[in-house]
Amino acid sequence: MAAVSRRAFIAGGVAVGVGLAVGIPFAVGASGATSTGQQLVSRARLPRPFTQRLVVPPTLTPVLTGDVDRYEIVARTARARILPGLTTTIFGYNGIFPGPLIRSRSNHPIEVVYRNRLPVPIVTHLHGGHTPHDSDGYPTDYVYPEDMTYLRQHQEMSHETPMPAGDTTNGTRTYRYPLRQRAAMLWYHDHRMDFTGPSVWFGLAGAHIVNDDEEDALGLPDGAREIPLVLTDRAFNDDGSLLYPAVDRTLTTTPGVTGGFVAGVLGDVMLVNGVPWPVADVERASYRIRMLNACNARRLRLRLDPPPTDGIVQIGTEGGLLDAPLTYDAFELAPAQRLDAVVDFSRFAPGTEVTLYNDFGDGGMKNVMRFRVNSTSGPRYTVPSALSSVERLDPASATVTRRFRFQRGTVDHRSGWIIGNSPFSPSEVSASPRLGDVEIWELFADFHHPVHIHLDPFQVISRGINGPGAFDAGWKDTIDLVPGEQARIAVRFRDHVGRFVFHCHNLEHEDMAMMANFVTHA
Ligand code: C2O
Ligand code: CU
């Protein structure tokens, strides 16, 4: 008798009629030791680097403002122009990739109504959001497609037992975000059980910037001199469609990717805000550049060449402003991590081309984008030596130490990824933290695992026998663990009782079960 898969989604095998050609990639070697994953090879004609103009995602206008601002987003397929002369079918929030930029303010609640016009279920998570559990986008809280015939077909064709019921809805769902949190760049993305990797790869990701008074008082570069950069690697078929090595082209029934891609899916084209290796004109002025590594599996080591006089001045991280700026020649960013930086282009001669490189990439993947300094002079920003006051979580006050091993394992008789000894199951609870307590979480990694915890940020205490790493300052929501590494973090969940997840943010690892639940209690 065939055992019913624990991870089976209710769907049968209905073809997705949107022309998502998911081809079988050529296997190439893993990209050195810098990322855990395997790189796809595009078959489409790719543009020369630094020939396409950078665009910034449009800011979403609320449909209603008041005590609670309301936004609406329709998730739908759309034809995007990503490669010159070709069109690419994407899954797009409001039909674009990345999705529209949401700008909100601390302590001013918003709600976002998501409508699902895609042929697959969606689940939306506000990454970095301090969000009650029923709006956090739990992996089985499906929003089914609006088109109910799709759902009926699936139910009829299904030979599998439904998942333990989540908090599902048909067509639409309203997420409520109280935003009782500091200013920071968050992001929203799909979080569907078993299919987050392909859903994000096909386009379901966007940036969300929270501002607050403390940050406003710093007078940081803004307007056209604040540039959000959503970095994603992708690969393309010869017709311009996105290449992704999914086992199940319908992205509904059988999770997982083929062969060696179980390690993680790497693309061979770097997109910045959805544009391949773009170029942007900048004034001779200071800019605030906010970068998000939204790659499925690729780690980045970002460097500007020629370097600005002050280097890359980091002012913030996933959880908002640092207490003091830090300067770098290069900054490492694992999937889901963000860098908030001030870059001074004012000392470059007009016409200077400043290239953003990824030192962890090979070949074309060394390139990210280019800034071309024009002849207009703008304000130069002096970064204050004190930016904010960041509370330190005191490890000595911790009430409990928990240990989690992130490692390869067997999932449904196949190769996958697990935390401890168990693959993700919605019904298993791995930790029950009490709200307000400081806890130490000790994390071990066999390969590269960017570990992300929902609900509240944390602080890195140590890596092995050393202190925090060079890129660990401030409030983090994702820690970049390298093979064989052990790290200790201090975490405190402030409020919101309920069930949340933590997981590896290599999205193929996440889909192949490297996730676990914690349930907070008062
Ligand atoms: Cu960015 Cu649980 O995810
Ligand atoms: Cu991982």
Image (tube, rainbow, N blue to C red):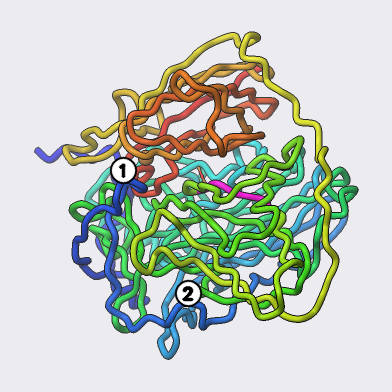
Q: Distance between the residues labelled 2 and 1?
A: 29 Å
The numbered mark at residue 276 is 2
Q: Give the range drawn in magenta.
A: 336-341
Outermost residue on the bottom side: it is 85
Residue displayed at 47% across by 79% down:
82
Ligand 2 placement by image quarter: top left
Q: How crowded is mark 1: few (under 14 residues within 10 Å), some or many (20 or more)?
A: many
Residue in view at x 58 percent, y 59 percent? 172
Q: Position of residue 514 (x, y in %)?
A: 36, 36
**Going by the picture, which residue comes out furthest to the left?**
1
Front-most of 426 and 430?
A: 430
Nearer to us in this view, 23 or 285: 285
Residue 124: image location, x then y, percent: 55, 52
Residue 73 in sight here = yes
**In the visual, does 76 lie left or right of 389?**
left
Q: Nearer the viewer, mark 2 or mark 1?
A: 2
Q: Position of residue 351 (x, y in %)?
A: 66, 80
Q: Residue 512 carries which label?
A: 1
Q: In which quarter of the image is the N terminus?
A: top left
Task: Answer with the quarter of the image where residue 257 lies.
Answer: bottom left
- Going by the image, does 68 lie left or right of 510? right
Magenta includes 330? Answer: no
Q: 409 left or right of 99?
A: left
Q: Considering depth in this image, is 372 or 175 the residue closer to the camera? A: 372
Label 1 is placed on what type of residue? Met
Q: x and y percent of residue 320 in the render?
A: 71, 42
Type of the residue with mark 2: Pro
At horizontal 22% and vertical 50% (from top left) the residue drawn is 159
Q: Which residue is drawn at 44% across and 57% down?
A: 121
